[in-house]
Image (cartoon, rainbow, N blue to C red):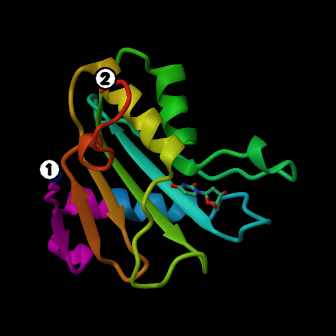
Amino acid sequence: MKKELRIQYDYFTNIVELEEENQYLIAKAREVAKKAYAPYSKFYVGASLVLENGEVILGSNQENIAFPSGLCAERVALFYAGSNYPNLAISKLVVVANGDLIAKEAVLSPCGSCRQVLLESQNRQEKMFPIYLVGQDDSVHIFSSIYDLMPMAFGK
Ligand code: THU
């Protein structure tokens, strides 16, 4: 017997098709990506995360000469939110990336560790939140929640 996993997500060819609030969050993520500390990979990632009270938390990737000591942009933002606003639910995450590690038309897809942390954040608040992945070419891939980026996850 074959079983199948299917995932559907929303795709927009350009950010101009999105509501203004989302365009604003993308602009903020791009701004913070410029502040990434990425001398080793030269890959600059920005994450903007919205809390249920409307507060926007930003994070960029922070590298280290001892490679595993660095942290991805998503987790910088998620852990900041968890540290400072443990009782506020996350209502949206936007991720952008800039650099040669991925093709211009490709979209950054969060790493496995970030997905596991996203899953924990969602489980903790018991409420799903969408994840917007924005390409360097301004295309947007919107996933309803981490469940769609992490099928059959441990801890679901
Ligand atoms: N990176 C992120 O910030 N987010 C991801 O989802 C994938 C990778 C960072 C880690 C490292 O600083 C650089 O991008 C190259 O892997």
Left or right, 142 with reference to 71: left
Q: Residue furthest top?
A: 87
Q: Is residue 101 above or below residue 78?
A: below
* Quadrant the C terminus occupies: top left
Q: Secondary structure at mark 1?
A: loop
Q: Secondary structure at mark 2?
A: helix
Q: Is residue 66 above or below residue 38?
A: above
Callout 2 crowding tier (Cα within 10 Å): few <14, some 14–19, many ≥20 = some
* Residue topped by disc 1: 3
Q: Earlier in the sequence, mark 2 or mark 1?
A: 1
Left or right, 103 with reference to 125: right
Q: Quadrant of residue 116?
A: top left
Callout 1 crowding tier (Cα within 10 Å): few <14, some 14–19, many ≥20 = few
Residue 141 is labelled as none
* Residue topped by disc 2: 123
Left or right, 44 with reference to 135: right
Return the residue nearer the eye: 62 or 100: 100
Q: Which residue appears at 31% of the width and 23% of the height?
A: 123
Q: Is mark 2 within 8 Å of ligand 1?
A: no
Badge 1 amino acid: Lys
Q: Quadrant of residue 76?
A: top right
Return the residue nearer the eye: 116 or 83: 116
Residue 62 at x, y percent in the picture:
70, 50
Q: Which residue appears at 42% of the width and 57% of the height?
A: 95
Residue 101 at x, y percent in the picture:
60, 75
Residue 11 at x, y percent in the picture:
18, 70
Badge 2 amino acid: Asn
Query: What range of the chain is rendered magenta?
Result: 6-24
